[in-house]
Amino acid sequence: MCLSLRCDLRRTVFAVIYLCGSFAASHGHGTFHERFEELSAALREKPDDPGLLYRLAAEYLEHGDWTTTLGQLAHLDRIAPGVVATDLLRGRALAAGGKFAEAKAALDAYLVKQPGHAVALGARAEVLSELGQPQQAAVDMAASIAATPRPEPDVYFALANYLVAAGQNADAIRALDDGMARLGPISSLIDRAIELEVQLGRSDAAVARIDARMNAALPLQRPMFMALRASVLARSERASEARAAWQALREYLATLPPLDRASHSMLRLAEQANQALATPAP
């Protein structure tokens, strides 16, 4: 391939070397088979087009076919070596196939060329976790979050899990709080923070979080949080407060309309309250 043509190709496919670039633009428009047919038709016209070949490899990975993705990337590197940065997609494909050491090597190579790339850092964090390196995974995920304009809640959840695996529960709670400060009161993040507060023996903090959720809940959601509050108090050996919380739940359930009160979930909560209150007070 001549130098001028290589330069033209680099400019042409610059946007598609990022996984969240051209792939994200193509994904979601039609089924896999429809997108595959569109790409196949385009490749019949331009069989060696690096951008199209990269998109096809990405489609295969999205479809769960990581082995074909690797084959497509190898073909792309043979016909247009160095034109498209394939290591990110290769790393994700290897991770999908459980080849975590090889995946890390590919992602390392990509991040040498593209330091601070949010998607690559997040992908390497997942790989590091699988390799039993949660502390390093947390570092990568935190860097990925910092480089992302509006992260998804799942990345904060993952960061917290990595920190917990590294024995840093307090830092995990701070990560969850950072996520909620940035994204708002996401239920999954609040629930995980409550769980970690209980594990750390910080029952006041856990109850405060539960109360905040309960106060913002719809009427039929409130009993679930009331039961959680009572359970946390009981686990924290605050027996008299737990008993009062179970009694408050039973009284609240009695105020619900008959059809709501007779639902399976409400009956289960009533049974839990009755069982707890049946135990003699200490």
Image (tube, helix red, strand yellow):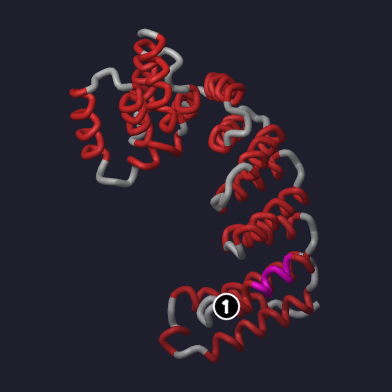
In the image, residue 44 above or below residue 282: above
In the image, residue 74 above or below residue 247: above
Q: Is residue 101 left or right of residue 230?
A: left
Quarter of the view holding residue 52? top left
| Number of other residues with Cα within 10 Å of mark 1, as a class: few under 14, some 14 to 19, many 20 or more | many
Quarter of the view holding residue 8? top left
In the image, residue 67 above or below residue 259: above
Query: Of residues 200 and 121, which is closer to you in this image?
Result: 121
Residue shown at 37%/31% (left/top)?
58
Quarter occupied by the N terminus: top left
Q: Which residue is mark 1?
A: 223
Quarter of the view holding residue 196? bottom right
Query: Of residues 276 and 30, which is closer to you in this image?
Result: 30
Query: Of residues 39 and 203, which is closer to you in this image?
Result: 39
Amino acid type of disc 1? Pro
Residue shown at 58%/22% (left/top)?
113
Q: Is residue 36 left or right of residue 210?
A: left
Q: Specify the segment rendered in magenta.
A: 206-212
